[in-house]
Image (cartoon, helix red, strand yellow):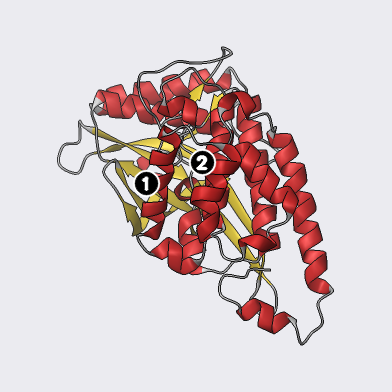
Amino acid sequence: MLLDLLDKKIRRLVCKLEKYNVHLEVFDHSAIEYGEVIGKGGEGMVQKCIVTYNDLPIDGAVKTILDDSDDAICLTLDEIELLCLSKDPVVNTTLRVYGVAAVPDDNDSEVGRLVIIMEAGLMNGLQLYQKEEVPLHVTFDLWASLSAAVHTLHTRKILHQDLKPENILVTAIVRDVNGQIEKIDAKIIDLGMGRRLFTDKIQTDDILGTNGYHPPEVLFEESYDFRADVFMLGVTFCVMLQSCSFLKSRQLRDMLRKLHTTKKKKVFGKALFESVLEPSIPDSQNLPPAIRSLLCNMLERQSRRKVSLVRVVATCKQEATDVKTQQSQLPPRTQPSLQQRPGFRY
């Protein structure tokens, strides 16, 4: 895309966001100091960066959009708009976008590349659970935070449509003196399939999202609403309960494939949880009843999926507190053996 045209599109987005009292910084390309590459995919390359803002150096990440077609640029600008509109002063919601820039192409100064300057994360949610045996109470607390973030998206009329562990960005991990994880901060990322929903329901011929995570109403191409995100969040939570070895093997892919085919047979809710998801969860019999019931409700067909995200937040917060209290009451000689049990995460 021509540099001048790209700059005009960026300025148009800035003006549009100002109507919602949302500011998007437009950086001069000379203010960006590029660092090591931390990720690369079909749509773009992500590098560490230092960007100058108000004469101050700010650490972040810069994503260069490799596809400079009009469609790709417009889709990316739409995603940036949703990310900016989803920001909340209290609740951690989505990846924070610091700003954008139109950068001249190395081979042709009249051609522009769109770059996005954003906060840097540590890893995505799947990578975290592949690497760490996260304590159960920390997982429940993380679920509460993620549910609050999605609820906030919904209050802004934003439907994500592709919730999964890979679309959760871990921004901080707090550990105790022994190296045990005490707290995880995370945000929702990738609103490329997101949309603002101003009607009661939507109908689409496209099956959006990722196989295994699709809610039944999307899989069967029925009309759907914000409850679609609740189902995908439920599957995401169940994946986070699996062991590191399970998540690092093809067993996860096999489980998601089985989940997909089982839903096609119109098996939902408790039956879906018990037949596909629960068998591979370590120590599943030790899951608190309230959590088990919550997951089953989140995995229901749309008409029976009545649990609100506000309720999900409250339940997960309470169970996180209860599990942590139970842990603190365990005799010192008992705690190590419990922690050494394969897959047991307190």
- Under mark 2, the amino acid is Tyr
Under mark 1, the amino acid is: Arg
Q: Measure the C-alpha gap from mark 1 to mark 2.
A: 37 Å
Which residue is the site of mark 2? 98
Q: Is residue 345 above or below residue 277?
A: below
- With 230 as the anchor, is 16 left or right in this view? left
Query: Left or right: where does residue 217 sit relative to residue 257?
Result: right
Q: Residues within 10 Å of mark 1 (few under 14, many from 20)?
A: some
Q: Nearer the viewer, residue 132 or 192?
A: 132
| Viewer-closest of 142 and 342 | 342
The residue that appears at 55% across and 22% down in the rendered structure is 225
Give coordinates of residue 219: x percent, y percent.
41, 29
Report the residue marked by disc 1. 257
Which image quadrant: the C terminus? bottom right
Give residue 233's position: percent from left, percent from top: 56, 41
Q: Which quarter of the figure has residue 207?
A: top left
Q: Is residue 23 visible?
A: no
Question: Considering the image in quadrants, where does the N terminus appear?
Answer: top left
Q: Position of residue 128 (x, y in %)?
A: 50, 62
Q: How many marks?
A: 2
At x 68%, y 43%, the residue is: 294
